[in-house]
């Protein structure tokens, strides 16, 4: 049995890119935050970096999978240009007012459980950094330690909370 790995799950809006108050619907409005050094440090400590994000704007028809893909490709490339590899993106395309209930919309743990299964992650050695209480709740439900930050707060300010 291969050894389980450790990971840091990251919420997207307000953690990796600037919080806009509502959905980021266009690539032009997508502003990457400078968390390059902090995420490089986590990567160098052996953490896999994964994104877990609610994207209810898809269900509302405010943007489509193509535009979301462009935003995620841009995010991945900007971080890669700074030596940081974001391994994967897990997103919930649902919204309770449009698509009903699902297992993946945070605070439910579905997105994290997908990542844990796909990458053989040890939840007990992993973290979820988010700027909403629902992120911490999703982490806890998945057996991952949640760390709550303020929107757009530099990740470097909480590195001491991660082993």
Image (cartoon, rainbow, N blue to C red):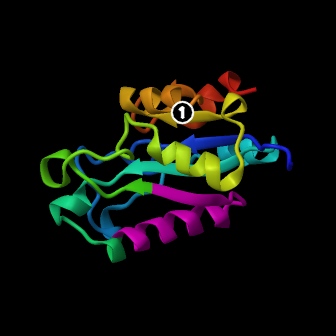
Count the labels in the image: 1
Is 145 located above or below residue 11 in the figure? above
Percent across and percent down for residue 69 are 42, 72
Percent across and percent down for residue 14 are 40, 42
Residue lying farthest to the top in this orientation: 161
Residue lying farthest to the left in this orientation: 97
Is 73 located above or below residue 90 in the figure? below
Residue beneath label 1, please?
A: 142
Residue lying farthest to the front in this orientation: 1
The reply, left or right, for residue 151 in relation to residue 48 is left
Q: Tag 1: Cα neighbours inside 10 Å, few (<14), some, or many (≥20)?
A: many
Quarter-wise, where is residue 107 in the image?
top left
Q: Considering the numbered disc 1 on the image, is that residue within a helix, a strand or a loop?
A: loop
Q: Main secondary structure of the magenta part?
A: helix
Residue 36 seen in this snapshot: no
25 or 51: which is nearer to us? 51
Percent across and percent down for residue 29 are 31, 62
Q: Residue at x 66, y 46 (%)?
A: 39
Please report the bounds of the magenta region as a residue range: 68-90
Percent across and percent down for residue 112 are 53, 43
The reply, left or right, for residue 118 in relation to residue 54 is right
Q: Is residue 75 magenta?
A: yes
The reply, left or right, for residue 4 in relation to residue 15 is right
Q: Is residue 65 magenta?
A: no
Residue lying farthest to the bottom in this orientation: 66
Residue 63 seen in this snapshot: yes
Quarter-wise, where is residue 158 in the image?
top right
């Amino acid at each position: 049995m291969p050894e389980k790995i450790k990971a840091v799950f990251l919420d997207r809006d307000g953690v990796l890119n600037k919080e806009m108050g509502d959905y980021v619907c266009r690539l032009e409005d997508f502003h990457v935050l400078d968390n390059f050094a902090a995420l490089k440090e986590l990567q160098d400590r052996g953490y896999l970096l994964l994104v877990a994000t609610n994207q209810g704007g898809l269900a509302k028809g405010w943007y489509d999978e193509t535009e979301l893909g462009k935003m995620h490709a841009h995010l991945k490339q900007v971080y890669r240009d700074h030596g940081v590899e974001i391994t994967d993106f897990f997103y919930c395309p649902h919204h309770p007012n449009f698509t009903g209930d699902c297992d993946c919309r945070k605070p439910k743990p579905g997105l994290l459980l997908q990542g844990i299964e796909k990458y053989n992650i040890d939840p007990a050695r992993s973290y979820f950094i988010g700027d909403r209480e629902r992120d911490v709740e999703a982490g806890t439900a998945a057996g991952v330690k949640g760390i709550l930050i303020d929107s757009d707060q530099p990740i470097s300010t909480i590195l001491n909370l991660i082993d």
